[in-house]
Amino acid sequence: MMQSRTHTCGELRLEHVGQTVTLAGFMENVREVGAGLSFIVLRDYYGTTQLVAETPEILSVIKELNKETTIQVTGVVRERSSKNAKQATGDIEVVPSEIKVLGTCQHNELPFEINRSREADEMTRLKHRYLDLRNPAVKANIIKRCQAVSYIRAAMTAKGFLEITTPILTASSPEGARDYLVPARKHPGKFYALPQAPQQFKQLLMASGFDKYFQIAPCFCDEDARGDRTPGEFYQLDMEMAFATQDDVLSTLEDVLIPMFVELGKYERVSQAPLRRIPFNEAMERYGSDKPDLRVDLELQDVTEVVQGCGFGPFDSPCVKAVVVHDFTQARKWIDKLLADVEVQTGNKVCWVKVDENGNLTGGISKFLLERQEAFKEALGLKPGSFVCMAAGKKLAAQKTAGVVRNMLGKRVPGHFDEDQYAMCWIVDFPMYEIGEESGQLEFCHNPFSMPQGGMEALLAAEGDIEKLLAINANQYDLVINGYESASGAVRNHSPEIMIKAFQMVGLGEEDVKSKFPAMYNAFTYGAPPHAGCAPGIDRMVMLLTGEESIREVITFPMNQKAQDVMMDAPSAVTQKQLDELHIAIVAEEE
């Protein structure tokens, strides 16, 4: 046992009564009961133990200490007269004969009560994260993270994967987000980049003759924060397999991740292997999202042909999607709130109708559909009490907006959201290309290193024809858990010829490929095996395991939404000497 204690604060039981023990921990609380008696709660990593101060010497020591002072206590264990069934050590208490101060808390007032730290504002919690982590509920999330990582390591190793670490200082490459750049002192004007992912390195490992690779990889992206994404750095289970197909990767991850969610997850019900595989186009058509939350039992329905030309302008759009809820009893104010929330989230307006007790359409835009109401009701299977919310526009916009409607209706109307489970699926057959929203040009839809379905033949057959190119699917797949994209992967494009042709379709020539991805391109010219992989997000999976809504709750020292570490005051200014050594000059912004 450690020198400063014989037992932990979560260890003592009735069988220890009469023993002299030494405990050490934080003085969580002091409660005075009259002039000669005080109860103290001592807390360490393992739990809490009640101390009873009943001698003048011990009372005088306690009286001088602030809460959260670290102390060492030697005393005798005795049975409590008033037991606490909610406390693991609630049958006993320790009567101290000696108290030694190990670390003094010099603050009379704490920034928050430790056990209620989650009620404090986030900036205060982040600034005093070392105190926030003393809260057992906060600490439990970090423990769960450790358990998840340990589980993954053991499972991947058991499947014959080697854990190999890849470089942190590397070259900048166009992988979708902004790089974090590191100036190279010995190479003025040049920069390293922190890797957005070990994508190229793991493919190079496959070209190097390794068969199965994984690592718990740190990744760095200079992007804005979201509830399910932290700015700056994140961690993923990065894995790759040589001579592998999509089926090999999916079945491997199902064998690793599903049992982990069964063992460590908050919810008892977990989707079982083999998981559903939903093609991208079907997911958009049925759920309005490529990361559908399958805990919601509602689906989108297409009413374009039924409503076009009815006199309601938006319905003359290329696509109209509807979401139906039966036995709807919510009031008009509730509906208005729903419509407003959808518009805030999507930037698009939606409309609605109801079916009254006589079977007639009423409310919303019903007047435009009266002449078609029978066809409309038949198309959607409506009955008295049905509510219909509709989104119109270009196909993708209508699908996405209706997808938001689906989620909001499903989670707000009772009976359509089965929350206490992990509903998992694979989204497959992603489009290889898309038209960029900002550029208006053909771009890679997902991962440029993916193998197009049909290989070179598909690319040659579609060359010069935008519609045919947009119809090409890639061997890409995402794991979706409870509406969160939790992993993304692909069968890789291991052929230099196919890679060059794929990039030519988006206006990048052979020299562009060679200059942007020199190591990978050159390695593949020496004969690379077919390979495939995936990268589940560690932070996001732990967020799901714990049932938290913010990913920052499962990161030990998270940044705030502005990518600032307010505890360490990062990013921070540096000295002029440091800048000079790096050949960097800071240019003041013009007012």
Image: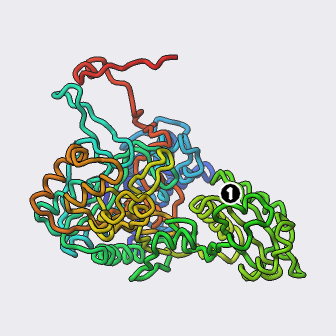
Name the one closer to the observer, 299 or 452: 452
Q: Position of residue 318 (x, y in %)?
A: 64, 63
Q: Is residue 525 above or below residue 414?
A: above
Is residue 159 rendered to the left or right of residue 76?
Answer: left
Q: Is residue 583 above or below residue 502?
A: above
Q: Is residue 190 above or below residue 357?
A: above
Q: Position of residue 104 (x, y in %)?
A: 42, 39
Q: From this viewpoint, is residue 50 visible?
A: yes
Q: Residue furthest right?
A: 358
Residue 392 found in image quarter: bottom right
Q: Which residue is located at x 63 percent, y 51 percent?
A: 34
Q: Of helix, strand and loop, which one carries label 1?
A: helix
Q: Amino acid type of disc 1?
A: Val
Q: Position of residue 477 (x, y in %)?
A: 38, 68
Q: Which residue is located at x 55 percent, y 52 percent?
A: 118
Locate the N terminus and report the quarter of the image it occupies: bottom left
Number of marks in the rendered image: 1
Q: Position of residue 83 (x, y in %)?
A: 55, 70
Query: How did the renderer colour the structure?
Result: rainbow
Residue 244 found in image quarter: bottom left
Q: From this viewpoint, is residue 80 visible?
A: no
Q: Which residue is located at x 26 percent, y 67 percent?
A: 532
Is residue 587 rendered to the left or right of residue 544?
Answer: left
Is residue 403 rendered to the left or right of residue 568?
Answer: right
Name the one closer to the observer, 294 or 143: 294
Badge 1: how crowded within 10 Å, few (<14), some, or many (20+)? many
Residue 535 found in image quarter: bottom left
Q: Which residue is located at x 49 percent, y 74 percent?
A: 422
Find disc 1 in the rendering and name its residue: 342
